[in-house]
Image (cartoon, coloured by chain):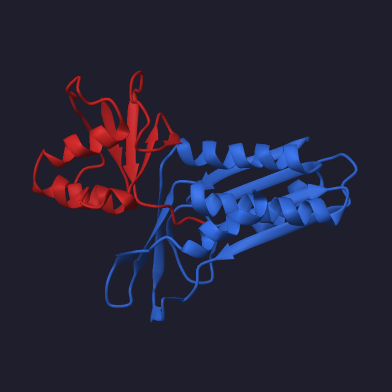
Chain colours: A red, B blue
Amino acid sequence: MKIVYFAWLRERLDKAEEDVELPSSVETIGDVMQWLKTRGEEYELAFDNPKVIRAAIDKTHVRPEAKIAGASEIAFFPPMTGG
Amino acid sequence: MSGETVRITLDAIDTKAETKAVSKAGGNIGAVVTFSGICRADEKGEKISALHLEHYPGMAEKEIESHVEKAKQRWPLLAASVVHRVGRIEPGEIIVFVATASAHREAAFQAAEFIMDYLKTSAPFWKRTEGGGREAWVDASEKDEDALERWK
């Protein structure tokens, strides 16, 4: 699964994207965040407060309970500040 | 609707050319409303030398297009244009430009506000400040979330 990161999430993780093998027990966006937190200190810190993290599946906004089955790209980013 | 533009660019926005394109999009245009969002010289009371705008390519365009589409369903628009800059933007420069055209002003005014309100909260762009002693990501504003209430 391709995962992309933006803004301070990208900076804290020091990567803009990565390919990961998700265990089959990981079914939702919330599960992905929980699983990422187990991958190291920088992930734990970056995903410390899930309330300030937004997610998208294949470039569409989704909520933490969204199922990831069939997704080809998952994105995590802070609340948006454009305009 | 004949003219519809959604563009993300690294270059300065030529508001005159953008406004002209929308005004001449065709149909019975009687009103064009334009909005320019400009980089302020200070953020939370601290002077900044620039903003850096980052976006999620593909999704940013898609989000804006979907809200232009929703505006079209809600108001009788004859044209709409949204141009958003990314990269380094200095105070006084335009970050975002929205133009809407309709036969009468009410639809054009409301559609421009609607598009901006949704762009602020759902289009994936992020601002980081440069200068002011430190570099920092700009926090999202609750006021922007509240602005959506009136369209529900």
> Which of the 4 image quadrants contains residue B133?
bottom left
Name the one closer to the observer, B133 or B62.
Answer: B62
**Residue B146 x/y as whole percent:** 55, 60
Residue A54, by quadrant, is top left
Q: Position of residue B14 (x, y in %)?
A: 63, 56
Compared with A3, A40 (above or below) is below
Q: Horizontal placement of A12 versus B146: left or right?
A: left
> Residue visible at 53% across and 36% down?
B62
Q: How many marks?
A: 0
Residue at the spot x=87%, y=52% of the render? B104
Foreground residue among B69 and B24: B69
Q: Residue at x 13, y 49 (%)?
A: A42
Does residue B13 appear in the picture of this structure? no
Name the spot of residue B132 as percent of width and height, x first.
Answer: 33, 77
Give left or right: position of B99 versus B148: right
User: Which residue is more in the foreground, B22 or A48?
Assistant: A48
| Viewer-proximal residue among B20 and B143 | B143
Name the quadrant of the N terminus of chain B: top right
| Left/right of residue A43 with respect to residue A78 in the rendered view | left
Q: Is residue B37 visible?
A: yes
Hey, which residue is sitting farthest left in the picture?
A40
